[in-house]
Amino acid sequence: MTVEELMPQILDLIFEYGPKLVGAILVLVIGFWVVKAMTNGFKRLLEVRDIDASLKPFLVSLVSMLLKVVLVISVLTTMGIEMTSLVAVLGAAGLAVGMALSGTLQNFAGGVVILLFRPFKVGDFIDAQGHSGTVHSIQIFNTILKTPDNKTIIIPNGGLSTSSMTNYSTEPKRRVDWTVCIGYGDDVDKARAVIKKLADDDQRIHKDPEVFIAVSELADSSVNFTVRAWVDAPDYWGVNFDMNENIYKTFAKEGLNIPFPQMDVHVHKN
């Protein structure tokens, strides 16, 4: 067929579907603007209602996604597409997509499990999937961590919900453990008294339960003390670092040696 013969058919299609297509595009553009406004309004409502920070990103993302799906279906309806046929096509496509995106669906289910059972929440410091950091947000498919050196780590919820995890923020108190070494020949009682005084002088260390100090090992080059103290969770690292420094400085003043690995070689003449 020539162009002249095709033109009447093309014009008929334009006149028949052109207005519908233009209307659909307008509805889509305005609809996305409305969806954005409604999502922001929903977000503000959650903030006013003081909803748990762990739930906010998940609920906002879920509502935004559902509104966009409703919008797309509405636009297709305005174009004259029958919903029964559309549902059948979407069902078949959904099955295929579901099989292709099984990992993504697993991550979605993992996000739901995390929010239901709450093994951690926003603001907790956790160790999971080989990564450590503070939980920044729990999203539909991923959990976002911020490391102490301000890196962003994205962990899929599927593996996070089914694997082991350590949450350092669950309990209000934590125990700090040290191994303190002195040289053979040093006064054990004096070393214990020095460690005890350093612990008693630090107001961040709890007095109940009492600080545990005991000789735990007679090592190759040193006599080792095990020291255990309880502190408030936020004070853990500060107490740990300060105690190390104080022990080093005070032992030097008190004449106590902190040995390092060494080997003595004795040569005997026959």
Image: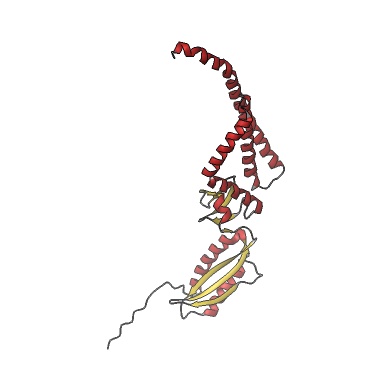
Residue 237 locus on image (x, y percent) = 56, 60
Identify the residue at image location x=58%, y=61%: 236
Please name whichever residue, 203 or 104, is drawn nearer the observer in this view of the structure: 104
**What is the image's colouring?**
secondary structure
Q: Residue furthest right?
A: 49
Residue 98 locus on image (x, y percent) = 55, 43
Identify the residue at image location x=34%, y=79%: 265
Residue 104 visible in the snapshot: yes
* Quadrant including the C terminus: bottom left
- Above-or-below relation of 218 to 178: below
Residue 121 locus on image (x, y percent) = 63, 52
Q: Residue furthest front?
A: 1
- Above-or-below relation of 32 to 13: below
Residue 226 locus on image (x, y percent) = 54, 73
- Above-or-below relation of 19 to 191: above
Q: Where is residue 259, by image quadrant?
A: bottom left
- Above-or-below relation of 243 to 113: below
Q: Residue furthest left?
A: 270
* Quadrant including the N terminus: top left
How many numbered circles does the render carry? 0
